[in-house]
Image (cartoon, coloured by chain):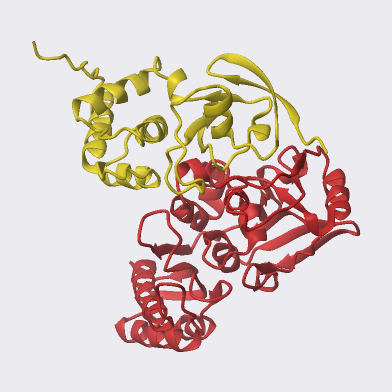
Chain colours: A red, B yellow
Amino acid sequence: MKAAAFDYVKPKALSDALSLLKQGGDDARLIAGGQTLLATLNMRLSEPSVLIDITDVEELKGISVVSDKLRIGALVTHTEIEDSELVAKHAPLLKAAAPHIAHRAIRNLGTWGGSLAYGDPAAEWPACSLALQATMVIHGQAGERKVSAKDFFIDLYTTALESDEILVATEIPLAPSNQVFYFHELARRHGDYAVAGLAAVAQKDGNVLSKCAFTFFSVSSTPVMATAAQDLINGKTLNSELIAEAVNTARNEIDAIADITNSAEAKKHLIGVLLERGLKHLVS
Amino acid sequence: MNLKKKISLTVNGTLVNAEIEPRRHLVDFLREDLHLKGPHLGCEQGACGACTVKVDGQIIRGCLYLAVQADGCVVETVEGLTKSGVLADLQESFMRHNAMQCGFCSSGMLLAAAELVEKQPKANREEVREWISGNYCRCTGYHSIVDAIVDVLDARAKGQKIKPVTAHA
């Protein structure tokens, strides 16, 4: 199908983009990579009257280290993250996750900020940003505000972004030298949305993990952390009994919801499968 | 209300000026306005990869990109790339392995494979399969397509040239 007619504007400055967004109200949509938006327009699931193309806005671009944080601009593409040496060094979880996002032709256009702002619970970046304790940098008419990933993802496709605000960048604490990470997703075809996935980081000292963050995605209406399982693992020597206990804990604490082809029970089962594999990987 | 926008872009080395509706996909613009039938229109939701073209040097989905977004860009389709080394090698290898069947997916497969050969010249068979998983062949001819791409990677790693297929007399 073809999209319904719409107007198209391409501001160069963030302030102009914010004004256009305010002016357009509910009929305006931002477009960056457009890799989700254009599919929904083609299927006429959405019929905005104007698209505001923000890809010329310089403030939204680039990956850099700013003091003790890795700053990733909203317009940074999945491919740029996949290929970035700064990301590989300071947030290796993201480099591991990137190849799982759709396919190269889509990763070449789709953006970090677009994925976060859309808030799809099956997407990789929301889960990674939660595991890495990212902070979202948001601009609106009133200026800048910052929201932690923990408070950003509110519900299905619902974030803390107001309709007249733009996600500008994300700040991620630099990975400490003893950080270990694991990223895996179970999907029917490589590149499809996961049936269930896990983005995990921890700090490792011998066989002891601490500061664990196990974030599951595609199992609930937002990415979700297995906090009880994390508390169980933190500071203890990891062995097969502890792994089994953590698997049961994670299955019990996460309120998994079914999707169109997989039951909540199946999701709970896969949460355990992923966590067991992940923990074995983290101490290997 | 006239929603048409003027765009100016380079397609396969030629400067093109046009006036189009913002809702027009790049792939529709290439096929219907410029009569380039290499990129095909399949699913229109980014799943099948038949519409794959290059914009500013990298592959994209022509159905998830608006022609208006390509204003000022360099666009290449399979028609414009046949003289490049990687693509010529892939085309020879596809012929050698009969990796085309009905051919609907072939232009997208070739463009995706060319980016793989350029970006990941050391890719193994498993990585080739993963990379082209974004391109559907509904004849399910994947095996020979993977064979063809792996052969090109092997040959280039050894500095060998892919030999042209010659017809039997």
Q: Is residue A53 visible?
A: no
Question: Which quadrant, please, contains the N terminus of chain B?
Answer: top right
Question: Which quadrant, please, contains the C terminus of chain B?
Answer: top left
Front-lying residue, A167 or B25:
B25
Q: Is residue B135 above or below residue A68?
A: above
Q: Is residue B116 visible?
A: yes
Q: Is A235 on the left-hand or right-hand side of B126?
A: right
Front-lying residue, A128 or A222:
A222
- Percent position (x, y) of residue B146? 25, 39
Front-lying residue, A268 or A242:
A268
Q: Is B49 on the left-hand or right-hand side of A166?
A: left
Q: Is B111 on the left-hand or right-hand side of A32?
A: left
- Percent position (x, y) of residue A63? 64, 45
- Percent position (x, y) of residue B58? 51, 32
Q: Quadrant of residue B156?
A: top left
- Percent position (x, y) of residue A146? 77, 64
Q: Residue at x 54, y 43 (%)?
A: A84
